[in-house]
Image (tube, rainbow, N blue to C red):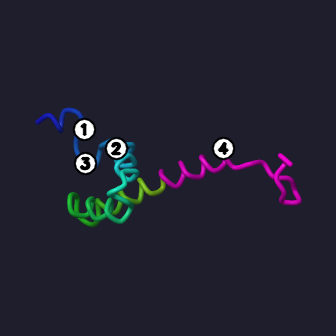
Amino acid sequence: MKYATYYGTLEKINLLVYIALMFYLRYKLVGFELSLFNLLGKIQGSAIALKVKEKVEALFDDYCQLYNPLTTQSGQSSGA
């Protein structure tokens, strides 16, 4: 089967594939989790959903650190 050649099993697939699915507008975290529960069962699906959620939150935190404007100690922007 071609799917097994490129992706392997659903448990071993690259997490970036799942993250890309979460960024698709029709699926959000809730729909993503429901899909995993239906495909893998509640236990395995929730484990993968938790991994993906942690990775997405880490990516968001990194994004915020990169693009957050620098502030002074008084709380005002340094670009004044």
Q: Residue furthest left?
A: 1
70 drawn magenta: yes
The spot of residue 37 in percent (x, y) is 26, 63
Indicate the secondary structure of the residue bearing disc 4: helix
Q: Which mark is residue 28?
A: none
The spot of residue 35 in percent (x, y) is 26, 60
Give me the residue at 52% from left, 55% from top. Answer: 57
Q: Which residues are magenta?
A: 55-80
Amino acid type, label 2:
Val
3D distance between C-alphas at marks 1 and 3: 8 Å
The spot of residue 5 in percent (x, y) is 19, 33
Amino acid type, label 4:
Leu
3D distance between C-alphas at marks 4 and 1: 32 Å
* Disc 3 versus disc 2: nearer the observer: 2
Q: Which residue is mark 3?
A: 10
- The answer to the question of whether label 1 and label 3 lie on touching residues, with beta carbons closer than 8 A, is yes
Q: Residues within 10 Å of mark 1 (few under 14, many from 20)?
A: few
3D distance between C-alphas at marks 3 and 2: 10 Å
Q: Residue furthest front?
A: 80
Q: Which mark is residue 66?
A: 4
Which comes before the other along the chain, label 4 or label 1? 1
Q: Which residue is mark 2?
A: 17
Which comes before the other along the chain, label 3 or label 4? 3
Amino acid type, label 1:
Tyr
Q: Which residue is mark 1?
A: 7
- Residue 1 picture quarter: top left
Indicate the secondary structure of the residue bearing disc 1: helix
Tell me if 72 is positioned left or right of 10 in this view.
Answer: right
Give me the residue at 42% from left, 54% from top. Answer: 51
Tell me if 72 is positioned left or right of 3 in this view.
Answer: right
- The answer to the question of whether label 2 and label 1 lie on touching residues, with beta carbons closer than 8 A, is yes
User: Can you say whether 75 is above or below 12 in the image?
Assistant: below
